[in-house]
Amino acid sequence: MPPEISLPASLQDVEQVRSVRTPARLDYEFTAGEASSRFLKGITQKKIIGQRATPESRVYVPPRGADPELGATTPIEVEVAQVGTVTSFCMVNVAFYGSVMELPYTSALILLDGADLSIMHLIQEIPADEVRIGMRVEAVWRDDADIEPTLESIKWFRPNGEPDDPNVRIPGEDHGTGLGSWVGGVAPTEALIRNPRTGEGGQA
Amino acid sequence: MTEQDAGAILSAPLIIEYPFKRTTGPVIGAFLTGLREQVLVGSKAADGRVIVPPAEFDPVSGEDLTELVEVGPAGEITTWAWVTHPHEKHPLDQPFAWALIKPDGADTPMLGAVAADGIDALATGARVTPVWAEEREGHINDLTHWVLEAEGGAA
Amino acid sequence: MRDIAIISFAQTPAQRAVKEQNEVEMLMPAIHGALGQVDMTIDDIGFTCSGSTDYLAGVGFSFVSTLDGVGPWPPIQESHVEMDGAWALYEAWVKLQLGELDTALVYSYAKSSPGDLPMVLTRQLDPITVAPLWPDTVSLAALQARALLDSGRYTEEHFAEVAARSRKSALDNPNAQLAWDRPASDVLAEEYHVAPLRKSDCAPITDGAACIILAAGDVARSKVERPAWIRGIDHRVEPIHLGLRDLTVSESTRIAAEKAGVADGAVDVAEIHAPFSHQELILRDAIGLGEDVDVNPSGGALSGNPMMTAGLIRVGEVANRISNGTANRGVAHATSGPCLQQNLVTVLEGEN
């Protein structure tokens, strides 16, 4: 229990304030940096461009300029495919602030062919309850006149008609590192994770 | 995003808004209630000092402080700084002084904006009195600013 | 206590705005520089600790993505403080004192340029009774400067001397943002910015990053010829309400300096984190530095002040002077918060 407060006489018979609104607004001029700028400029040419540190290392899409496995810069640009595989998804039944989507809709992680990092995007042109892991999808772009340096220039992804991928590649599994995944149902302990810098450990 | 020039880095306006509604607790709640009622309230510390704005805890011993007392509302400037070019977020849009103001009967000063004709009108030790908003809701901005007593404030 | 030393320090040049890089892109040269100087990789590091605040660039949890710059896979032991990197260094020092690990990497960074820094920093003030007034950092520092003038201990001439001396010292610092050689009288001739402070009394707004590597005992000796040993380190905090503090002194610094053992020996060099000229005067007194001490040979924060980083840079600048033999014992100070609210003092020493 909070301690009893004694008020001065002038405030004893008035309603006490219990909460206060203190809205604050901060204005920034955000700069995208080099990697994101190159990615977004690729989008304006309807290309999806990732980056990697070495010819053998992972391809990150969208790139942030750093390879978290190697702790290195990612100077090599790689254009990846505009088709990929759904690695996970969720059905959204709740309206979020600012969302213009009709409910329900599906938001999915899509591993583009040639990339090692899934991007998150919408799945459309298929009933929401038919979306599944392993489904092959392709990017649907806005009209050329409406292409801008934003990932929203891809309106959504839709099924491309290819059969499902029965061996959904969770990013990292083929490297034996289990990035975020539990290989064979086992938690990724140090013994299971290959160190991508030294090549030690793991089940490469 | 807007492209500044060919080959350049992209940039875009980013606006962050925090729409906080905060629970005050009984001590700060009483302080804000006081502002709504045009009264300044401080808390009495274990050593007898009166702290404004009131604190829930003794700054020395950490014990609960429960006795709230009325102070001011007029007071004295303990230090000040003259703002030649007010920021749009500042409480006043003409050149003004920030000041730490010790209300009469209080032992610690509180921050406020002081309206004055110019830097020469200000001095440490000058007497000031609060100017209240016409519509008050229990918010620090209910006390819009302070004025020098000699310049039209209540003597 | 274990012997723990700074064995490597790297920083990016202090710049007003690093527009061409995101935070991790800006940070990586500091990390790679610090590791490369001592021929180490992240796999040689036992613990990683960083300092930053996401409010500066307005990108929530950006400290998580900047960790990518060190190569945190397989998962490394790491931590983050929303404080100057000097406090991250303190946490790393404590971690190494536990005796389980021998090396630590500490980094910090700030991109203040995207936002309105003096206003962004109002968010660290009391959220109900102070922050809604939007008192910017310069205004609050000016209140402190006026109180110091009123105390009779210092004058605006003293402020101007600190401002001029700092920028002159910075001429020898390739990483400085502001460096010039003009007399203090030129500073006094400037118009007030927020009276009694002039623009030259204030640190610039800076983007930048820094990285330090710590190592214990023989590991440190095996990596560098002359490690900069941490002989003492302590930090203290003062109340959030300015009205509860005597702004003309820095009691938290005084206690931290005493606990860190500043007075236990002669001090050759001191790097003081004073974003405003008058604060150097307050801090010199609080630390107890004599007239003979070389203060801020780098130019200090007045010559480049990346938020969350300028304190760590002070530690690195002292370490460099010990490692290169120009000093044997030095003091580094870091601050955070309005009007020197939080202060850290560390004493570094070479091996005789």
Image (cartoon, rainbow, N blue to C red):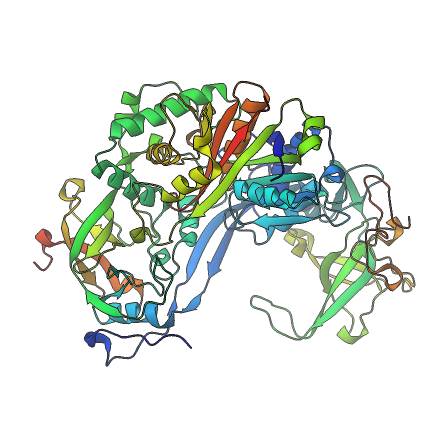
Residue drawn at x 70%, y 31% is C218
In the rendered image, the vertical position of residue B56 relative to residue C212, given as above or below: below
Q: Quadrant of the N terminus of chain A?
A: bottom left
The residue nearer to you, when weighing B22 against C257, is: C257
- The residue depicted at 36 percent of the width and 47 percent of the height is C136
* Figure disc tally: 0
> Is residue C256 shown above or below B155?
above
Q: Percent position (x, y) of residue B22?
A: 42, 68
Left or right for C241, reference C48:
left
Q: Position of residue B63 (x, y in %)?
A: 37, 65
Q: Quadrant of residue C278?
A: top left
| Left or right of C236, for residue C184 | left
Answer left or right for B67 relative to C171.
left
Indicate whether A98 appears above or below C123. Answer: below
Vertical placement of C191 versus B38: above or below?
above
Rendering quarter of residue A195 = top right
Residue A36 visible in the shown view: no
Residue C241 visible in the displayed image: yes
In the rendered image, residue C133, in percent from the top left (x then y), is placed at 33, 55
User: Residue A32: image x %, image y %?
Assistant: 60, 44
Residue at point 39% right, 59% down? Answer: C127
Residue nearer the viewer, A202 or C222:
C222
Q: From the viewer's perspective, is A181 left or right of C210?
A: right
* Along the viewing direction, whichever of A171 and C172 lies nearer the viewer: C172
